[in-house]
Amino acid sequence: MRNLTLDGVAISVATEVKYLGLTLDSKLLWRAHVDAVTSKATRAMMVCKSLAGKSWGCTPRILRWMYTMIVKPIVTYGAVAWYSRATIGTVRQTLSKIQRLACVCITGAMRTCPTAALEVILELEPLHLSIEQAAKRTLLNFAREGFGKGKVLSSRNRDKLGTQPPPTLKLSVSLGTFHSIFQAEVYAISMCPEINIRRNYRKERILILSDSQAAVRALSSFEIKSSLVRECVERLNALAEVNDFQLMWVPGHMGVAGNEEADHLPRTAASSTPIGPDPFLAVGPNTIKEMLRRDNSKLRELHWLGTMGQRQAKSLLGGYNLSRYRLLMDLPKEKLRIITGFLTGHCKLRGHLHKLGIWSSDLCRFCDAAKETPLHLLMECDAVARRRYRSIGHVWPREEHIHSLSPGSIMKFIDTLGLVDVL
Ligand SMILES: [Zn+2]
């Protein structure tokens, strides 16, 4: 290695090299890469942060958009190569600092507010899970249907459907668990030319009927996005070269011979076991998207439940909640800050201020009998029971009532207690 020269000049050995945006180190530990993306993402987040202040600038919705569309892709880029690095505890902590910066910037939460609770409020999974998801998406895309442009299918010979004898061959094939209805329809059509080609038909009049408009449209479309459709078009073209062939759409349940019967056949196939490893067909993009979404929501919920402490936030927030997040994103900055503080317990109520050493007593200002926390005010305090009923509709709400409360009614409750200026 030391003696390698080019034009008489010795080539020096580098321990790090940047290739396609990934920083590779000599031992492939990805330490340098993580350091590089962390500082790059932090710089980008600081730029986003400078676009908004406490009462001016970008709305929380725009800030969240900037984080997910600009900052997060910097981190998740090339994840399939280095995601194993993100499973290390210290790396997770480094990554969570970036997300924390974003969460605090979007919500305006207190410095003490835990990141996990803010992630639940903002519907963001922890960053190490985003990296895992990105890696999974890339890997699954290898099994996905390909892209490409196919030939135009001739449709010049479509004449009226005459009386046809009922089909003699009945076939049902099980496609495993990952296929979509569209894929099954296209697969069924592509089986027809395959069987006909195998039978070595020549100069025959062949008519293929399908009641799937989507499949027929995809097969006659100029642009073909799915390799399954392309394969089907190729088979149909091969059949059409030596036969008089037509593909026709027929409306379902219209008394076409064989159509009613074809509707019953899938039941036979569904109960049988497919031959070969699943996925039997290349997995469609929507199926992959849905699988990843389900996987992600399961993992992030487990992460949230597994975080230590945060009794207040766990009781008040429950878990991830999409409709609550949407309503929160419609709120102005100041209200979002107040509600975030209230729902996480990290707000200027006496219980928390006492913990920080700012207030002498932690007792409730209304009943003077218990620690003043959001949980106490929302569920236990006798002194505000009537006001609680007026604003949230329950005198003694249970945790599930609290989880389903809209941000609007929580804000109303805070308002009736006269705490808006305090918080
Ligand atoms: Zn009280």
Image (cartoon, rainbow, N blue to C red):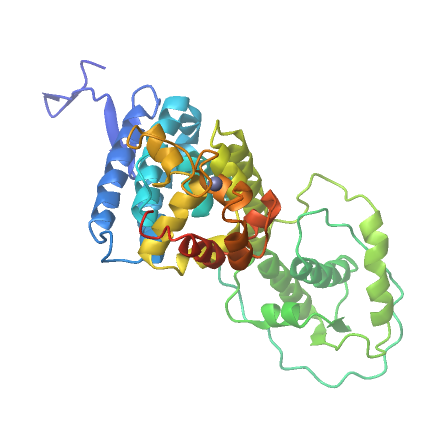
x and y percentages locating residue 390 in the rendered image? 53, 59
Q: How many marks?
A: 0
Quadrant into which the N terminus falls: top left
Q: Going 21% across and 53% down the picture, which residue do you hit? A: 51
Vertical arrangement, residue 151 with respect to residue 147, above or below: below
Residue 96 is left or right of residue 313, and the answer is left
Q: Going 67% across and 52% down the picture, which residue do you hit? A: 179
Instruction: Report whether residue 138 is seen.
Output: no
Picture quadrant of residue 360 = top left
Residue 9 is left or right of residue 193, and the answer is left
- Closer to us: 251 or 55: 55
x and y percentages locating residue 255 in the rendered image? 85, 78
- Closer to us: 77 or 340: 340
Instruction: Report whether residue 340 is seen.
Output: yes
x and y percentages locating residue 416 in the rendered image? 43, 56
Residue 33 is left or right of residue 249, and the answer is left
Picture quadrant of residue 219 = bottom right
Q: Going 29% across and 46% down the picture, which residue do you hit? A: 105
Q: Going 73% across and 50% down the picture, which residue do you hit? A: 175
- Closer to us: 214 or 293: 293
Vertical arrangement, residue 46 with respect to residue 230, above or below: above
- Closer to us: 216 or 56: 56
x and y percentages locating residue 99 in the rendered image? 35, 39
Q: Residue furthest top?
A: 2
Picture quadrant of residue 333 = bottom left
Q: Residue furthest left?
A: 8
